[in-house]
Amino acid sequence: MAKAVAKKKKAKSSKKAAKGKLQPLRRLRRWLLRAALGAAAFFMFLVLLYSVVNPPITHTIWVEQRRLGEVDRMWVPLEEISPVLARSVVAAEDAQFCRHWGFDARAIQAAIAAGGARGGSTISQQVVKNVFLWQGRSWPRKVLETLLTPVVEIVWSKRRILEVYLNVAEMDEGVFGAEAAARKYFGVGPDELSARQAALIAAVLPNPKERSARRPSNFLQRRATQIADGAATIRADGRADCFED
């Protein structure tokens, strides 16, 4: 009888010990779940807010402002940006912009086949990265970008996505957005750009710190010619319809 009682006590103490070990794990899981839900709510709030309110600053702009001392930027609505610049940027960066829901499978496959030498990000992905996240290659950022991009595509219109992109993209070192780029490169407003000027600005986008639309290299001039042809093509075949009046 005494042995049976001792065994029961031992079993109870073992259970308590095991329960005590599980408590911190449960607390950690609960904390992680709350943190994840809090982050999701925060990002959802920002996505909804920026669908109607212009982002006051981005992480990239803030970093460049600290590095350079000041940056050149001024927000302008899409209506005040030359349609040829919008078409040129789409032709250069994401020709299927009007036909995908945030990701371009063909572009991703091409990027993988090229061994990462070329980018596969859509304009929607770039907006998510520029507005909500940070630059650089890291798995946490890529996961967040993958989760947020479809949400932005659902909540924002294609015109809004492109409008934000044309105002936050770096187009020269410390120069952000179409208005600042048009005035710096060509001394005109973003609504006065010619097809050639628009194509040159679009050609700069992948590497704005090393390329210049004011002093284009032979490569950049050839690339601008390709972009101008692409801009005319997407206008003719309807791939610009989602962001044009």
Image (cartoon, helix red, strand yellow):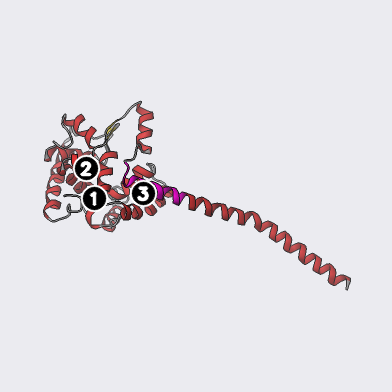
Name which residue lies at 24% across and 37% down: 76
Q: Which residue is mark 1?
A: 94
Q: Which residue, given by chain and number where applicable, does mark 2 sit on?
A: 78
Q: Which residue shows up at 33% across the image and 27% down it?
A: 70
The front one of 138 and 9 is: 9
- Identify the main secondary structure in magenta: helix
Q: In the rendered structure, which disc, 3 or 2, sits on the residue that comes first in sequence? A: 3
Up the image or down, 16 lies above or below 137; here it is below
- Callout 1 crowding tier (Cα within 10 Å): few <14, some 14–19, many ≥20: many
Q: Secondary structure at mark 2?
A: helix
Task: Work out which quarter of the rendered image holds the N terminus and state it.
Answer: bottom right
- Image position, residue 174 (x, y; %): 30, 31
Mark positioned earlier in the residue sequence (3 or 1): 3
Q: Amino acid at mark 1?
A: Asp
Q: Nearer the viewer, residue 245 or 11?
A: 245
Identify the residue under disc 3: 48
Label 1 secondary element: loop
Q: Is residue 44 magenta?
A: yes
Query: Position of 206 compared to 219: left or right?
Result: right
- Read off the magenta span: 39-53
Crowd rating for badge 3 (residues with CA inside 10 Å; few <14, some 14–19, many 20+): some
Q: Please name whichever residue, 69 or 220, is drawn nearer the observer in this view of the structure.
A: 69
Per the model, the C-alpha gap separating discs 1 and 2 is 17 Å
Q: How far is the residue under mark 3 from the one under mark 1? A: 24 Å
Q: Position of residue 116 (x, y in %)?
A: 32, 49
Percent position (x, y) of residue 18? 70, 61
Foreground disc of the pair 3, 1: 3
Q: Tell me where residue 82 sits by quadrant.
A: top left
Q: Is 196 left, or right, of 108 in this rendering? A: left
Label annotation for residue 227? none
Q: Amino acid at mark 3?
A: Leu
Frontmost residue, 132 versus 6: 132
